[in-house]
């Protein structure tokens, strides 16, 4: 507010110190009428411009020339800088009309053209400066808004990424813990049963339990981002893929589930993340069979690799479980569906026409989902 009051104060001081006593009252009143409204020019630019223009008309009618007439240009600049297009054009037209009237009344020796051109150029320059100020301010506001929007979008993307990472870790931990604990429980039961009748088989089962536990710990550390690729455990337990399905089938056979594995086609071109998805799908399907079917059930795993897809087909000969009576719980089948959907696949899980249970999906290696995965 101090800066706003500087110009009116200077104009009033100039009038008080330069005008004769008989001219002073009119000059002070007109100067105040011209300059004091400028104190509110940013709050109500068009209203202030109207007040200043009215005071300038009174000045013209009284025939008093004052330096305070510069307040008209200040009000015009403010109107152009803080109002819209129509308000700016109207204010400029009013000032230009005042220029014509001032030149007609105060031009010396009939020299109308020179002052008219000079004052008109001044009006145009002040208007352009005001419009540029308004445009610059609007541009800065747009940039700030865009920056704020981008920051918000980045925060949202970060939250989504964190949620996706939590979901990924949840799926991995579910698959790792559920599978390995199921295998270890089955192996422990077998070791207890065989410890007196066949100590060698009991010892082999206990060794398999130990190896399964180490594999589970390595997989859990890797899923949580703790295991580095240059650590010995990482080299001993590589990221599971199609090549490790044979070991998985052997693990399931050792746990009491006869498992047959058929892999057709070359899987060398399949990305590591897609191979991990295949492994986890087969792992979850076999774990469900081990947990929910009686002894004597066997399982078959068929993997067909082509240039653009991988088909996963896991079936068992066990009885179909009863239909669920409530909403689905757990992460098994929903997690498998999410893994399959990440590669453009639709998981089919349900009873087979000839008996047993089947899980089947087709992962698309060249889909956009693969790229985003």
Image: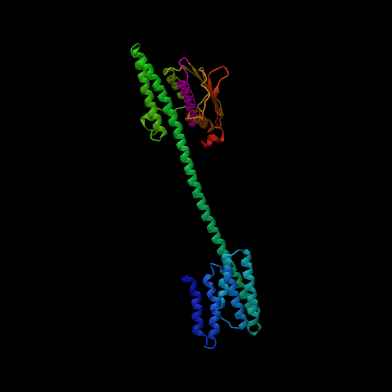
> In the image as oriented, which residue stretches furthest toward the front?
325
Q: Which residue is drawn at 47% across and 35% down?
A: 167
Q: Residue at x 36, y 30 (%)?
A: 232
Q: Answer above or below: position of 66 versus 204.
A: below
Q: Does the magenta stretch include residue 281?
A: yes
In this view of the protein, can residue 26 be seen by the observer? yes
Residue 251: name its quadrant.
Answer: top left
Q: Residue at x 62, y 70 (%)?
A: 92
Residue 368: name its quadrant.
Answer: top right
> In the image as oriented, which residue stretches furthest toward the top?
197
Q: Is residue 127 magenta?
A: no
- Counting labels gives 0
Instruction: Give the image location of residue 363, x and y in percent.
Output: 54, 29
Q: What stretch is highlighted in magenta?
A: 269-296
Q: Answer above or below: position of 81 versus 333.
A: below
Instruction: Give the image location of residue 38, x and y in percent.
Output: 53, 72
In this view of the protein, can residue 303 be seen by the observer? no
Instruction: Give the image location of residue 313, x and y in percent.
Output: 53, 23
Q: In this view, does 167 lie to the left or right of 57?
A: left
């Amino acid at each position: 507010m101090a800066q706003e009051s500087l110009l009116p104060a200077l104009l009033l001081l100039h009038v008080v110190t330069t005008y004769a006593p008989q001219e002073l009252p009119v000059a002070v009143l007109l100067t105040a009428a011209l300059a004091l409204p400028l104190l509110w020019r940013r709050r109500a630019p068009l209203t202030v411009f109207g007040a200043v223009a009215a005071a300038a008309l009174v000045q013209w009618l009284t025939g008093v020339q004052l330096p305070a007439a510069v307040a008209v240009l200040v009000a015009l600049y403010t109107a152009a800088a803080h109002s819209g297009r129509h308000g700016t054009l109207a204010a400029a037209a009013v000032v230009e009309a005042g220029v014509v009237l001032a030149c007609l009344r105060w031009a010396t020796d009939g020299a109308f053209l020179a002052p008219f051109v000079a004052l008109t150029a001044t009006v145009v320059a002040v208007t352009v400066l005001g419009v540029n100020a308004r445009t610059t301010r609007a541009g800065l506001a747009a940039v700030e808004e865009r920056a704020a929007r981008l920051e918000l979008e980045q925060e949202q993307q970060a939250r989504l990424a964190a949620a996706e990472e939590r979901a990924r870790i949840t799926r991995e931990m579910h698959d790792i813990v559920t599978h390995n604990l199921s295998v270890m429980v089955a192996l422990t039961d077998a070791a207890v049963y065989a410890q007196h009748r066949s100590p060698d088989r009991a010892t082999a089962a206990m060794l398999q339990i130990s190896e399964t536990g180490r594999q589970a710990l390595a997989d859990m550390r890797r899923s949580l981002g703790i295991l580095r690729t240059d650590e010995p455990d990482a080299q001993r337990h590589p990221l599971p893929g199609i090549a490790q399905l044979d070991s998985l089938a052997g693990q399931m056979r050792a746990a009491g589930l006869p498992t047959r594995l058929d892999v057709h086609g070359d899987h060398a071109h399949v990305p590591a993340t897609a191979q991990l998805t295949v492994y986890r799908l087969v792992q979850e399907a076999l774990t469900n069979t081990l947990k929910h079917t009686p002894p004597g059930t066997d399982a078959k795993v068929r993997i067909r690799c082509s240039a653009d897809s991988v088909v996963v087909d896991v079936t068992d000969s066990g009885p179909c479980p009863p239909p669920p009576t409530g909403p689905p719980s757990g992460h098994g089948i929903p997690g498998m569906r999410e893994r399959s959907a990440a590669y453009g696949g639709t998981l089919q899980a349900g009873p087979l026409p000839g008996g047993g249970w089947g899980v089947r999906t087709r992962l698309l290696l060249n889909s956009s989902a693969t790229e985003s995965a």
